[in-house]
């Protein structure tokens, strides 16, 4: 309820959004259940949605499942899409909500909740714990391997609570504008900015620990 | 401006959304403070590294979703398409049915009944 009010307020402040002709045509075809329009939508937005969900969950298998559900939901509920926001914004809002729901669901499962991919875990040498987790890499000039850096970043993101995680993903991974982030989350710009800064600083601290 | 104030403005500074006056203050502080310059370098690197975390969907993504939709809707979800003419509009099917019924009705009404002879 509160979220709905926030969306309404955000929309009023920014004025109504007008869809482009191409966007309108594509949505119209989607509403007619045109299979080709569906293919186009998935090709256009598949990577964006997958990135968001994967970075939220940190687990490829779960991410594939949730990302698929996002597009199935989009297709099932597109009749309710009235074009008040950009289609991509609407789509990413669904992706964000479904990611959060899955995180909640996984955290309630006692056995394997919220696991991070094996591939994203720091490389462990036989018998010893993952060195990058506790050891420091000597000197700031040492370049981390790309895979190692990615694993470190993913763990730093995963350590954030999901609200901060979502903001940092929307802004720095997906590179969305503050307006789009506001429409997706329903948060005012000031809140987005201050939370984003906190999240970035926390990730920076993690990165510094392992690279200084 | 102290270290804390300078560093709390890093996000806006990097995003280019800091008002002119504050931006100059941060720049002044940075020019005089090596500690904050080091922090800023690291901050920039963090934001840059986050930008590299984009992840492409797997190649099987689209076929997998379509298979799911097909399976759950028992193949009824996507509108059927004719190879040459696209989708047949529902109105055409109704119209064709009405015409067929009309033709049948007229044929029954006016056709010579065969095998039926008038009573003598
Ligand atoms: Zn300083």
Image (cartoon, coloured by chain):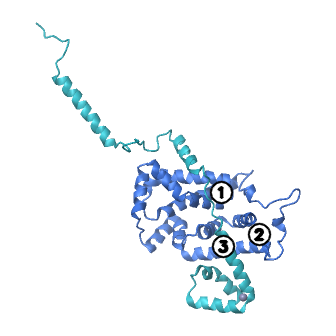
Marks 1 and 2 close (CB-CB < 8 Å): no
Residue B111 percent across, percent down from the top left: 17, 21
Q: From mark 1 to mark 2, how far is it between C-alphas?
A: 33 Å
Secondary structure at numbered mark 2: loop
Q: Which mark is residue A87?
A: none
Disc number lying in front (1 or 2): 2
Question: Does residue B94 appear left or right of residue A197 in this picture?
Answer: left
State which quadrant residue A155 falls in: bottom right
Secondary structure at numbered mark 3: helix
Beta carbon at label 2 within 8 Å of ligand 1? no
The chain coloured cyan carries which letter?
B
Who's the residue at 80% across and 60% down the image? Answer: A123
In the picture, the quarter occupied by the C terminus of chain A is bottom right
Instruction: Same chain for labels 1 and 2? Say yes or no.
Output: yes
Which hue is chain A drawn in? blue
Q: Which residue is mark 2?
A: A144
State which quadrant residue B41 falls in: bottom right
Q: From mark 2 to mark 3, how far is it between C-alphas?
A: 14 Å
Q: Can residue A208 be seen by looking at this rendering?
A: yes
Secondary structure at numbered mark 1: helix
Ligand 1's image quarter is bottom right
Q: Which residue is mark 1?
A: A104
Q: Could you say which is closer to the camera, residue A40 or residue B39? A: A40
Which chain is mark 3 on? B
Marks 2 and 3 close (CB-CB < 8 Å): no
Q: Residue furthest right?
A: A127
Beta carbon at label 1 within 8 Å of ligand 1? no
């Amino acid at each position: 309820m509160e979220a709905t009010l926030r969306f309404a307020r955000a929309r009023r402040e920014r004025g109504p959004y007008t869809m482009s002709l191409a966007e309108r045509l594509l949505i119209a075809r989607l509403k007619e259940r045109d299979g080709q329009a569906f293919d186009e939508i998935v090709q256009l937005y598949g990577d964006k949605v997958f990135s968001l969900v994967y970075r939220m969950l940190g687990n490829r298998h779960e991410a594939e499942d949730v990302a698929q559900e996002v597009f199935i939901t989009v297709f099932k509920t597109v009749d309710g899409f009235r074009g008040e926001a950009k289609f991509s914004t609407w789509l990413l809002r669904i992706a964000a909500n479904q990611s959060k729901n899955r995180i909640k669901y996984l955290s309630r499962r006692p056995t394997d909740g919220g696991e991070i991919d094996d591939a994203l875990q720091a490389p462990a040498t036989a018998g010893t714990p993952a060195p990058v987790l506790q050891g420091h890499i000597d000197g700031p000039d040492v370049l981390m391997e790309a895979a190692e850096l990615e694993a470190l970043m993913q763990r730093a993101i995963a350590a954030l609570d999901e609200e901060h995680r979502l903001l940092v993903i929307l802004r720095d991974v997906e590179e969305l504008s503050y307006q789009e982030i506001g429409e997706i989350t329903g948060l005012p710009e000031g809140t987005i900015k201050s939370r984003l800064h906190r999240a970035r600083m926390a990730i920076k601290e993690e990165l510094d620990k392992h690279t200084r | 401006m102290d270290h804390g104030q300078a560093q709390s403005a890093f996000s806006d500074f990097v995003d280019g959304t800091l008002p002119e006056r504050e931006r100059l203050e941060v720049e002044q502080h940075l020019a005089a403070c090596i500690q904050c310059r080091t922090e800023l370098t690291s901050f920039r690197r963090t934001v840059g590294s986050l930008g590299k975390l984009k992840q492409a969907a797997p190649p099987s993504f689209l076929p997998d979703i379509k298979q799911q939709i097909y399976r759950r809707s028992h193949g009824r979800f996507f509108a059927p398409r004719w190879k040459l003419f696209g989708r047949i509009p529902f109105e055409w099917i109704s119209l064709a049915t009405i015409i067929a019924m009309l033709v049948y009705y007229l044929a029954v009404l006016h056709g010579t009944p065969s095998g039926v002879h008038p009573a003598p």
